[in-house]
Image: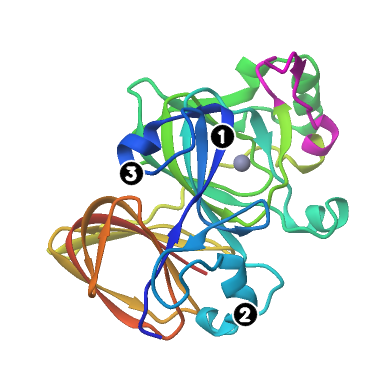
Amino acid sequence: MRELIFFEPYFKQVLWGGHRMRETFRYPIPGDDTGEAWVISANPHGQSVVRGGTYDGQSLGQLWDQHRELFGNMDGAEFPLLVKIIDANDHLSIQVHPDDAYAQIHENGSQGKTECWYILDCEDDADIIIGHHAKNRKELKKMIDSGQWDSLLRKFPIHKGDFFYIPSGTIHAIRKGTLLLEVQQNSDTTYRLYDYDRLQDGKPRQLHLAQSLDVITCPHTDQNTRGKEEDHGSYQVCTLVSSPYFTVNRWNVKTHAAISQNFPYMLIDVTAGSGLLDKYEVKAGDHILVPSGYGMIQAQGVMELVVTHI
Ligand code: ZN
């Protein structure tokens, strides 16, 4: 089918949210505490809805259920991916997600969660937490039990354009002053390890220490998945990650590029700039499903695209 399908995000207000999505993408956010935009989501807790075209007003979940041909007639009860933009105006809790096998048994048959982050913008002194320094599980438990967070957690500075792959079992936290694009397995299962002893409505948020200890990979192994930047003159392309759950490429279009869509489906997030994808005008903040059988996409303009397929 030769139609690009555009989505309107579902917005989520949270304690640590901000208002950068209004300034950066002109999104009609519901308040100055908007932390998440679920930009390509069929998750029952918040669905993206088609804007314009043949499927105007339908949710991604409806498309998955009733028009599976758009997705190459793939199997599966649920659309497997979830793409979000996150605006962290404060630190998020330190957390970890289970893998598919653990979630299957302990979370009512749901998926695990492997995710990845592409940094869209951040403050000069912004940092991130990924992984830990414990040498073995005994040491991990001891450091968690005694709250030695500064020596346990791996923290490092971040910059615009950085990319991080976070397989299930990896301790991680987004920190204050970060705007990022997240591509992840469609799952809500999060085990919270530490929440900076903060209170919400006078009470600490629930922690999940036993489950966290079950699923944390120990010792931590670093994952550098980013491939080399290929320069083709009118565009550059690099693979950010190629994993069993998703492959994510970053296209930097300088004048024009041809992007081949011969996967069951492809997702395009316009993260900067503007231009044309075939006859469609696109700009930063647009999120698009390119259906099965679409073929070649001609991109023109000056823009950055994050392109995901499975
Ligand atoms: Zn997470």
Q: Secondary structure at mark 2?
A: helix
Q: Which residues are magenta?
A: 194-212
Residue found at x 79% / y 53%? 103
Seen from the viewer's position, the closer of residues 56 and 212 is 56
Q: Position of residue 22 (x, y in %)?
A: 36, 37
Which quarter of the picture shows residue 59?
bottom right
Can residue 160 be spotted in the picture? no
Query: Relative to 9, does residue 76 appear above or below in the rendering?
Result: below
* Comes first in the chain, label 2 or label 3: 3
**Label annotation for residue 13:** 1
Label 2, label 3: how far apart the Cα atoms are: 31 Å
Q: Position of residue 78 (x, y in %)?
A: 67, 67
> Badge 3 local density, few (<14 within 10 Å), some, or many (20+)?
some
* Comes first in the chain, label 3 or label 1: 1
Residue at which label 2 appears: 66
For badge 3, the amino acid type reads: Phe
For badge 1, the amino acid type reads: Gln
Residue found at x 74% / y 13%? 202
Q: Secondary structure at mark 1?
A: strand
